[in-house]
Each structure stands twice: as structure tokens, then as C-alpha cells.
Amino acid sequence: MKDLMKIKTSFAEPGMIIGKDIYSASDYLVAGEGAALTDRMITRLKFYSIEEIIIITPESLCKKEKKKPVFKNKPVVVPKGSSYVGRIKSSSEYRTFSTTFYSSFVSYKEQVNEVIQNKAPLNTESMLADVAKIFASCKNPNSLLDMMMVIRNLDDATYVHSMNVALICNLFAHWLKYDKEEMEALTLAGLLHDLGKMLIPASIIKKPGKLTDEEYRIIQEHPLLGYNILKDQNVDPRIAKAALQHHERCDGKGYPNKLTLNEIEPFAKIVAIADVYDALTANRVYRGPICPLEVIGIFQTEGLTIYDPGYLMTFLDQIMYSYLNYTVKLSNGETGRIIMMQRNQLDKPVIALEGNRFVDLRDEPGLTIVGVV
């Protein structure tokens, strides 16, 4: 008889064997019993907000197979020489951006701490000025996305994440042709969406090990905590609603109130997309970053019932251009440069390889991108 164990999805690792079929809240089969977890499958579980899964215990597997299962990913070795990330890091534009980002980050953190600890009023003009400085340090929106991908080594993940979500929301406002007032409001919604997390003990936020059920329940209180702070501030009401609703999902399976498509504040729908994209592509204490193209592929194939389709398609249509010329590592160990994006399958571009060779990943089902280098 198999020995089964329930674990939090955040601690799932490649190689673990699924002990029971995993369904989404809308009864879609995400992964079947007996399958070995892969990086992509784990990303899909998080994408569907599946909080817990059941696996076959390592001891049970060892009894059956007489060997130890391997649950850890082997690190991807980045080849020496020039790479897209390397070229960004060595550019004068990146040096300006990183200095500006760090300065704005410090200013933002100080202001938020004043609000949290001393109940000071929000200085939204100063916050928006800091965001504007970051934009001014980049030559165009695609350049900004490049810089954000590279600058992933700052501490205080919650504060950095909020800055990143604000930048993505500002891009969204440009894409949607919002006027200045709406653009500033949406940017602030991104900047302040996780304000409630600042009230969660750092021992829980930064915990590298498994969260207890009680710790996870405490984490889920942050939307309401943030809303309670913002509703008493002199800000656009949509900003407070975005803080409260950014974990709601259009299929009614989010939290805290299980709202559906037409019940969710539009700003919250946009913040939700920016929030998930940045969270999955960033380093975390419990895992490394997930390849952004993999995240985009899952958004495209599985996100239309979870996120507002209009906003999601706007995001995908715009962000696809930022991946051109990325140097990527393939699952067969080769590296190459993205030269063409496929609108209907964004995670399967055309790659230029060494020796004047080209590969269209749509024609190679067993070949995938495992990372940006």
C-alpha cells in the first residue's frame, strides 16, 4: 500500500510522485496520479492557486523501487561568454537603472514604514516621482522589462515586488491609453497592493521551510489588512479595492471573498496579472525564478478563465516583444537567441543556434526553454 503525504505546493519539488489526481477549483485535471512532478507542472499548480497536493512518500517509493528518489533540481550551468543578461548588466543604461531603482526602493520602504509604524499619511506624490525616475532611466518600455528581469538580487522581497508590480501597472496604463490621472492611480494600486504584507511577521514572510496551516492562514489575511490601511488614506478608492481584491480570480475561486469576473475592481484585475507574473519570475527563499517564457506560456494556455481575458491579452500582446534577442538555454543543453515569437504559442519561439542553425520549438515537442542567460 502506498504511503501518502499532504504538502504545501510551495514546497513541491521536481521528481516527487503525485499520489492523487489534482484538480483545479473548476474541476480541470491539472496533474494525474502517478505522474512525476516537473518544473512546468509545479508552475501550473501555483498558477491555478492550488495550495496543497498529495504525494507518495519517499519511504514508500524506496520500498517499491529499492532506490532513493531524487527530488532536487540540478542547477542550470550558465555558459561562459557573452549573453543577453551579461550584455544588459554591463551596459551604462543598467548601471543608471540599478542606481535609480535602489534609491527609489529605499525611499519607498522608508515611506511605507512610516505609514505602517507611525500611521503617517501616504505621500503619493513622492512615490509617483520615484517611479517616474525609474522610467526615465530606461530608453523604452521593453528596456524597462529587461532591466527588471536582471535586477533580482535585492533583499526585502515584498518591497521590491511592490515596486516591480507598480512598474508593470504603469506599462499597462500606457498600453490601455489611460490619461495621466488614471495612470497614476493604477501605478499606486500596484505600488500599494501588498501593503498588508508589511503587517505579517517577517518570520513567516521569509520562512524558507514549510508553512504551517496557521501561518498560511495569516498570510491570506494581507489583502484585508492592506485595505483597512488604505481605506482611511486620501487615495482613489480603486487603490484600496485593488489591495483587497488582487487575489480574487475571475472564476470565483480566489480570496478573500470569492468574487467573480464582473464583481472584481478592474484595477485589481490588472494588478493580479502583474502580481503573478513578477512573483513567479522572481527569486524566492523557497525556490529560484521560473523562466519568464514558461510563465507566459501558461498564462496564454490556461489563464483566460482565471484572469480577465481583455487585460490578459493586452499583457501578452505587448510583452511578447520584450523577449526578442534573449539568449536562452534549451533542455538539450544548447544555447541560442530568440529571433521570432509565435503569437499563438509564445513559449515556443524560433531560436537561432550556433553554426547558422535554427529551431522552431513548435516542431520540437520534447525541446523546451529552461532559462534565460
Image: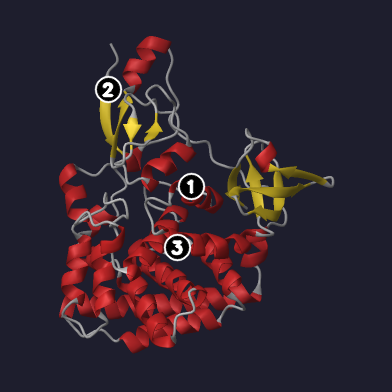
Give, as a three-letter code, the residue at label 2: Leu
**Labels 3, 1: front one:** 3
Task: Return the mark for residue 4.
Answer: 2
In x, y percent, where is residue 20? 31, 25
Foreground of the two, 270 or 170: 270
At 23% from the left and 80% from the top, the residue drawn is: 114
Q: Which residue is mark 1?
A: 298
| Mark 3–mark 1 distance (CA, rounded to whole Å) | 16 Å
Give residue 110's mark: none
**Structural crowding at the residue carrying mark 1, measured as other residues with C-alpha within 10 Å and reported as few (<14), some (14–19) or many (≥20):** some
Q: Is residue 156 visible?
A: no
Determine whether, in the image, residue 159 is placed left or right of residue 138: left
Find residue 110 and report its image quarter.
Answer: bottom left
Name the residue tied to disc 3: 310
Looking at the picture, the colour scheme in use is secondary structure
Q: Position of residue 294 (x, y in %)?
A: 53, 47
Q: Indicate the secondary structure of the residue bearing disc 3.
A: helix
Is 195 located above or below residue 355 in the figure? below
At x 31% / y 50%, what residue is drawn? 251
From this view, report whether residue 296 is shown above or below residue 234: above
- How far across and down, in percent of the image, does residue 31 sit? 40, 31
Q: CA distance from mark 2 to mark 1?
A: 28 Å
Q: Are marks 2 and 3 in contact (CB under 8 Å)?
A: no
